[in-house]
Amino acid sequence: MHDDGFLNLLDHDSFSNGVPHATFARLRKEDPVSWNDGDEKTKGFWSLTRHADIALANKENRIFSSAQGIRLEDQNREEYLARRTFQETDQPEHSGVRRTVNPNFAKPTVAKFETLIRELASDICEKALSNSEFDAVDAIAKQLPMMMLGRILGVPDEDLNWLVEKGDALIGNSDPDFTDHVVDKMDTSAYRMMPFRSPAGVELYDYAEDLLHNRRKVAEEGILAKMMSDEHGLKELDFKNFFCLLVAAGNDTTRYSIGMALNLLAHNTDLITQLKSGDYWGTCADEFVRLASPTMHFRRTATEDFDLHGKTIREGDKVLLWFVSGSRDEEIFDQPNECLPGRSPNRHLAFGQGGIHVCLGMHLAKLEVRIVLEELIKRIDTFEAIEAPTWTRSNFICGVKKLQVRATRVG
Ligand code: HEM
């Protein structure tokens, strides 16, 4: 769909050629607290598109609550309670779980994975570059997050393709390439109690149940074993939802951030030269994640009336925080649509920074992005797109699905 600056953010098709940045730029300028009427399936909602307003709402988490759902979909109380994870809770409930899981994802803990990530990334790049033409999403971007997900969870490598397929079906529930149950095209009410209203949620629940009841093995060093043995551990349903959250959150987001980097490299030889200089490894991962901003928004619900830029957000209204827009706000970023690998500071919002729900996996994700690029860059002379990339059909998750490239190796 052509982005004339007026695309409907409710419509998944508005995103099927990539993020409608012209629409977001217009909203930031003309209508920063923008009302969308919704449709027969989805109640109306507000969109916050400016960096400062998103940061404010993220900080004011008592007023902008996560405890009635964090996606656009309307959920009744029963559905909410069946599907919620700690991401869908407010303080103080949220802090209890967050404290338990945080140490597993802290920067020093994650830094210990560097050698493993480099070994995996090196194998992935060698394998990809054994062909001169390949789909860089499938051969590179998808591989490392998938393998690391297995290590983090503690599940065997042979299950990973299946888990990633199910994770894709959850998070890509509006894209026919990822699911037969396209959420806006058919009646998915049979799955309303399942994560993302998806049949894949049923299969992931079954897998998690097998883990809990020792019908499947789980590695002791993985986070799932820790969660299961913790005396304050999660109840069965909470564990199943936490499992689905990690399978969904820890996978596509990092893939699409690496995919964004590869897409930029494939269209810009200067970027390859810049990265080869070695001067940007400390900063470039944030810049790729900023430009990718793969989870484009998360939702909050107002717990009281709130006035902003002359509009009144009413108690009970849904409010979308468009991180993807805040991360390109011209008030904050010079040349917001350009990739400046040395950009510093880089106050992007792609990880939901500034809020209590700031991404748990961000240190891991950034490490993966940096290392896979280091391993690729040192091996390539040229890297060019030979077909236009294809994009996810979703107003929630954005990323390159397919990127056919031709590459030559150094030397
Ligand atoms: C580039 C990759 C990633 C991006 C862009 C990303 C984005 C985000 C964002 C925007 C939030 C905030 C949600 C909110 O405000 O409601 C979030 C939360 C979260 N992310 Fe990530 N994520 C990434 C990778 C990961 C990875 C690798 C994992 C785990 C292995 C992960 C696990 C989580 C979890 C569990 C939360 C919920 C935290 C909470 O509610 O306290 N993410 N992520």
Image (tube, rainbow, N blue to C red):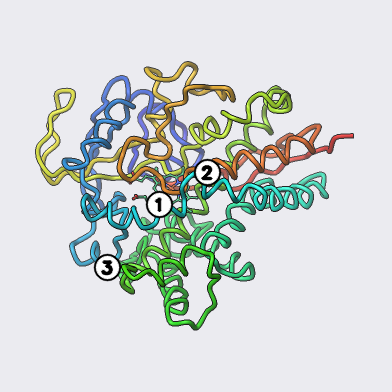
Residue sitting nearer the eye, 181 or 140: 140
Q: Which residue is mark 1?
A: 102
The amino acid pointed to by label 1 is Asn
In the structure shown, which secondary structural element does the residue marked by tag 2 occupy? loop
Q: Position of residue 4 (x, y in %)?
A: 41, 27
> Disc 1 to disc 2, how far (Cα)?
27 Å
In this rendering, position of residue 1 left or right of residue 151: left
Residue that appears at 83% across and 37% down: 408
Q: Is residue 330 above or below residue 177?
A: above
> Disc 3 to disc 2, how far (Cα)?
29 Å
Residue that appears at 37% across and 34% down: 7
Looking at marks 1 and 3 on the same chain, the residue that comes earlier in the sequence is marked by: 3
Q: Position of residue 335 (x, y in %)?
A: 49, 17
Tell whether label 2 touches label 3 (CB within 8 Å).
Answer: no
Residue sitting nearer the eye, 256 or 72: 256
In this rendering, position of residue 369 left or right of residue 374: left
- Of tags 1 and 2, which is closer to the observer? 1
- Residues packed near mark 2 inside 10 Å, few (<14), some (14 to 19) or many (20 plus): many
Q: Position of residue 155 (x, y in %)?
A: 56, 68
- Of tags 3 and 2, which is closer to the observer? 3
The quadrant of the picture occupied by the C terminus is top right
In the structure shown, which secondary structural element does the residue marked by tag 1 occupy? helix
Res 70 label: none
Q: Which residue is mark 3?
A: 82
Quadrant for residue 10, please give it. Answer: top left
Q: Position of residue 247 (x, y in %)?
A: 48, 60
> Disc 1 to disc 3, how far (Cα)?
24 Å
- Of tags 1 and 3, which is closer to the observer? 1
Looking at marks 3 and 2 on the same chain, the residue that comes earlier in the sequence is marked by: 3
Q: Which residue is mark 2?
A: 399
